[in-house]
Amino acid sequence: MEGFPSPKHLLLLLFTAALLLVSLSLRSFPTIRFLSSHRHSFRGGSTGTDGAGETMHVHKNPYHPLDPLTYNEIKATRSILASHPDFSSPNTFPSIHSLSLLEPEKAVVLAWRPGDTLPPRRALVVAYSANHTHVVPVDIASRSVLRHVVRARPAGYPSLTPEDMERATKAAAAHPDVINAVLYRGLNPSSGVVCGPLASGWYGPEEENRRVIKVQCYAKSPNFYMSPVEGLTVTVDVDTGGVIRVSDQGLGIPVPRNRDTDYRYESQRRMPTTEAVAVNPMSMEQAGRSSMRVGAGGHAVRWAGWEVHIRPDERAGMVVSRARFRDPEGGGAWRDVMYKGMVSELFVPYMDPGEGWYFKTYMDAGEYGMGTNAFPLLRLNDCPRNAIYMDAVFAAADGNPFVRPDVVCVFERYEGDVAWRHTENPVSGYHIREARPKVTLVARMVASVGNYDYTVDWEFQMDGLIRVKVSLSGMLMVKATPYGNLSLVPEGEDLYGTLVADNIVGVVHDHFVTFYLDMDVDGPRNSFVKVHMETQETAPGESPRKSYMKVVREVARTEEDAKVKLKLYDPSEFHVVNPSRLSKLGNPSGYKLVPGATAASLLDLDDPPQKRAAFTNNQIWVTPYNRSEEWAGGLLAYQSHGDDNLAVWSQRDRKIENEDIVLWYTMGFHHIPCQEDYPIMPTVFSTFDLKPVNFFRINPIIRAAPYTEEDLPVCSGADATL
């Protein structure tokens, strides 16, 4: 089955040359095949599985209020739209930019139990036509449009469709100035160049009241990212297909023709293998059947005390909902931890102010879609042998459904880590050695947004901890330069990056991943507590010590109180607690956010891209729950102005104490490229934890059993002696 060609970060029509690349041609353009409904086969019939390595097929019917829209529901939604007066003849059917589940009210979902009738199934449609954005909630069962909100000339647009990008790229490729620029560089316009569309950001009047896209070109090769036609940028009006401007400031810069850029295995296997990469294949095997249990709908998963609902999503990539834990000390009662968690936005600004680079300040979720850029996972390489897989059903621009297989995998993992241990020194008279292995459940998706690949893991641990991990790999976005050695660079000239190969600069950039975390610790009414650590001096004569660390707890009353910029020498813990759920010792039940390695934006707050991405001004925000406030960059992020985002909402300074609250956390990466990132980057990652704090009476896994040799299969291996 072929995947649906979706918007991508840098060259979004470049997933496969056959489907997504537009070759420059003086005479004609090759046909880019955009998938229509008859080319998407429906994969259904399964009702879930316990088995390893199986696929959670797409179901004809939903089983849970938060299950994604099914194939048939998307078809029904399109039919409802087509009969709506605003979209039926003589009016034209709009371009569908998003068609996804409109979740029921939170109270309805919390009250629902398996076996109950599902609440009404609804879809939220974001469409575009004739400079108007349409936001349309649809009730599928009653076949009715609930509302039709029309936004004329909004300060932001929905993400572009493949048809939009094809039109813009063809217009750029056919322009005489572009053809002449390609010929000047010694490239064959018919077969030697590929071009792709890039989001333009928003910088003022030129982008006002029209959808604008930038088109740039590369010399065709398996790793075309390393061969940019530097300085050539074409600005196109997406709706009219007209070229607004052609800028070429790179006529003196050669197109890099570097060797060893082909990263494919068939090319690499011809190279001599060194001991550094000569590792035999290995896999962790599980004795007996999987410990996972997957519900009938294929999205609700139970494992080791956890119950969690997982679904693919066009924009977020993967949504984790209704995370609950069965309390081993509380009579086995289910206790709420998190109602909903997901990637809300991913901001990627490049640090080159030049004509061909200043606009590269992407919002990968809102402008392109993490889910629409999630392609089938590679079994045994992206996910281990024991993984199960979930398909996604998305809507094409014409509103028809298609299936993207294997976009999420779920698996149990043991990496040799220790869950808890202690060895008692024999001098105590006790001969005790106890250790327990740490086994976890991982839900994973990978978004290949142009040159970058983002792996997002939600890892659930047996002790109630949730670890979120974001890993980055893929290709650098590089800039061609006339210099092949740093000694040739004139003094005072800024390359805006690192020379990583002959005539290639890896441009400095950032990645900021903002997470939406609707925490419901033992219920929706929670408070945010900053547990501050301060230096306290001892009183004269009190102690031989001069100082100690004192803990001061501060409950955030309003949104302003909860804004946090992380500081190494001003440490705090960040707790979400339920003030109404106290332990026998009087401590409120809670979870704490434990940030990992992170970074903060260094852009000026009034810089246009930073205004659009003002949600990265703090690492932590807390807002009252609001169904309409889920996307940190705003519902309509493409060419947004920064007037509808998390920072704007939070200015209302609403009450958040003992309320239904949402925690927002931004994970950051500064990336100064190096030679080892060329031609493809080894993976780097960062994490954060959501850790129980006074949630359990005692260590919840104290009863976990150790492993013995008899528990595990006997596997033979080669002699490992040196």
Image: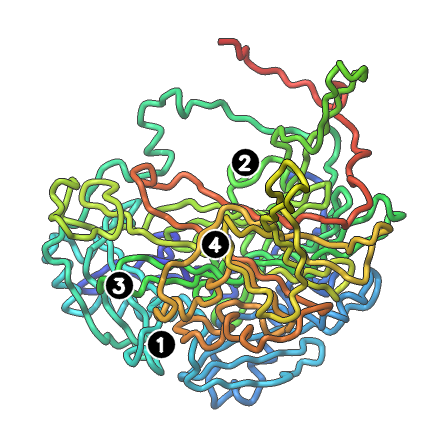
Within-10-Å neighbours for mark 3: few <14, some 14–19, many 20+: some
Residue 674: percent from left, percent from top: 31, 41
Mark number displayed over residue 2: 4
**Residue assigned mark 2:** 380
Query: Disc 4 marks which amino acid?
Result: Glu
CA separation in Å, label 2 and label 3: 38 Å
The Cα atoms of the two marked residues, 3 and 4, are separated by 22 Å
Judged by depth in the image, the label closer to the viewer, 1 or 3, is 1
In front of the other: 380 or 252: 252
Residue at the disc numbered 3: 29
Question: Quick one: 605 or 206, which is closer to the camera?
Answer: 605
Q: Which residue is mark 1?
A: 211
Q: Which numbered disc, 2 or 3, marks the residue closer to the eye?
A: 2
Asked which secondary structure carries label 4, the reply is loop
Mark whose residue sits in front, 2 or 1: 1
Vertical position of residue 185 compared to residue 149: above or below:
above
What is the CA distance from the residue labelled 1 to the residue labelled 4? Answer: 29 Å
- Nearer the viewer's eye, disc 2 or disc 4? 2
Q: Is residue 10 visible?
A: yes
Residue 310 placement, left or right of 209: right
